[in-house]
Amino acid sequence: MEYKMLKIFRSGRKLYHEFHKTVVQKRSFLSEAYRCEDAWKARLQFPLLQKYKPEDLFIILDNKFFIDGKVSAIDIDIFANTIRSKDQVEELLSIIQKLRKSAETTNTLDSTHHAVIRYLFDNDLTEQLMNVLHDRLKYGIFPDYVCYNMLMDAYIKKEDYASAVKVAVLPMLQEDTDNLITNALSIYACHKYLEHTDTWQKPSEPIEDTKEEIKIRVNYLRNPFFDDHFDLTDPIDLIGKTLAFQGKFMNNTLGRTCQLRGLILYKKYQDASKSIKQWLNEFEGDIVYNEVFDLIENDKEKVHKEEATNEFEQLMLEVNGLKEKNLCKDNLIEALENNVKSAVEKQHDIDINDQLQKYTEWERKRQLILDKQIEEMNREAKLLEINKLKEEMKKQERFLTFFENEEEIELQIEEMEAKEKENMEKLLSKHGAQRKLKKLEGEKEYIPPML
């Protein structure tokens, strides 16, 4: 009897752990309403987007790029908003690359950015999405706040922290702190990713596979330049700078904790030392979370294995001195989660209402731009027709008034002949012109033999 009870208890505990694990894996900070799915799908009901099939539209746009070298940004927007099939991803990426290389890229609509991101996300094309977001020079796609938050929340829910943190660093690169949810999810994603730092690898350096020496003439050589911002490629540097940037903006215990860890990850030891001294002068207690020292120690093992500079060692002494002060003993990950929940509580409904208004505004703006474009095309067609009619009338007038203006016309002909003769004399006066002319005449009169 006792054995059966123990077996039931063990199986019950196993079921509880499996259930608990499932619940944890499905953690999500944002509600389903935040994605505004119904409103987003409703765009396809508008007559303008129903008018075009994406397959046919791509062929038209591609041909126009080939012939004219550019396509209107509104046409690209219509294509991006109508495309749904996963099989058309290469067509979409090809079109937005071509738009980016043309002058029309300055007219790219906000709805185009949103549509491209949602298409890639809805079709589970994570790799292509990350490539597009991180190659802004090539594709020119920039997320809005709803896209930032929707992507980070979805990847955190899937425990795909590498993808979540790749999105989290983007607001830092844009130096954007306007949305509370974006800020909170960014630092949460960074901390969760740092628990497993092997899934986002630094891009490898291009390898020269040719042995042929190629010499290129250049006007001047550019000195190597590294801007320490957009040129950053190392994931740890990007994450460290994101934590430091967002932490400084927060300006509280949690923010100082993120800032300290971020500056050390980012290898800005002088800035970290300066911040520690400033905090010791300004704050009596709760300077940082006590848990951050264990995290810094873990980071030291993973990231700073080869660091042995005097600057780094001096900073570690200052960090150890900070441990002796009055610190916050609360759980750091709970604080990060509560920070996200607080931001969601304040910003959730505001973001939804703003996004719904944007969808309506985008539809109105798209129709307005298209109407203006059609009006401009009609105006150019009418102008061309008028100019053609003027030419015809001028020819007709000359024909009808020929005998009245015969002398004047003959004078014009004589002037033209004289000018032609003058040009020919100038040409013949050049060295070797006579010889070349005879050669050309001989080639002209040459008759090949009959075989």
Image (cartoon, rainbow, N blue to C red):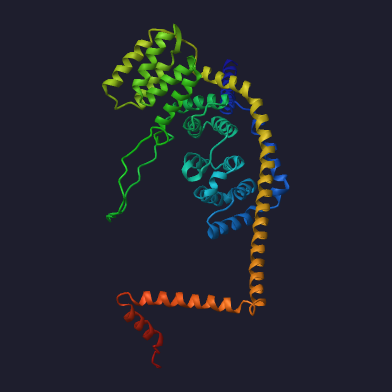
Q: Give the residue drawn at x 55%, y 36%.
A: 143
Query: Residue 184, how many percent across, how many down?
Result: 54, 24
Image coordinates of residue 118 in percent, x first then y, are 60, 40
Q: On the rendered structure, is 224 left or right of 418? A: left
Q: Horizontal and vertical percent for residue 101?
A: 49, 49
351 shown above or below 215? above
Observer-nearest of 427 and 376: 427
> Closer to the camera, 23 or 248?
248
- Is 434 situated above or below 113? below
Is 349 positioned to the left or the right of 283 in the image? right
Split into 4 quadrants, where in the image is the C terminus?
bottom left
The number of callouts visible is 0
> In the displayed structure, would residue 418 be above or below residue 11?
below
Q: Is residue 211 left or right of residue 154?
A: left
Q: From the viewer's perspective, tell me whether residue 444 is left or right of residue 72.
A: left
The location of residue 234, given as percent across then percent down, is 39, 34
The image quadrant that residue 6 belongs to is top right
Quadrant of the snapshot with the N terminus: top right
- In this rendering, the answer to whether 294 lies above or below 236 is above
Q: Going 59% across and 27% down the picture, which residue do you hit?
A: 28
Residue situated in front as seen by the camera: 247 or 198 = 247
Residue depicted at 30% across the width and 45% down the height: 221
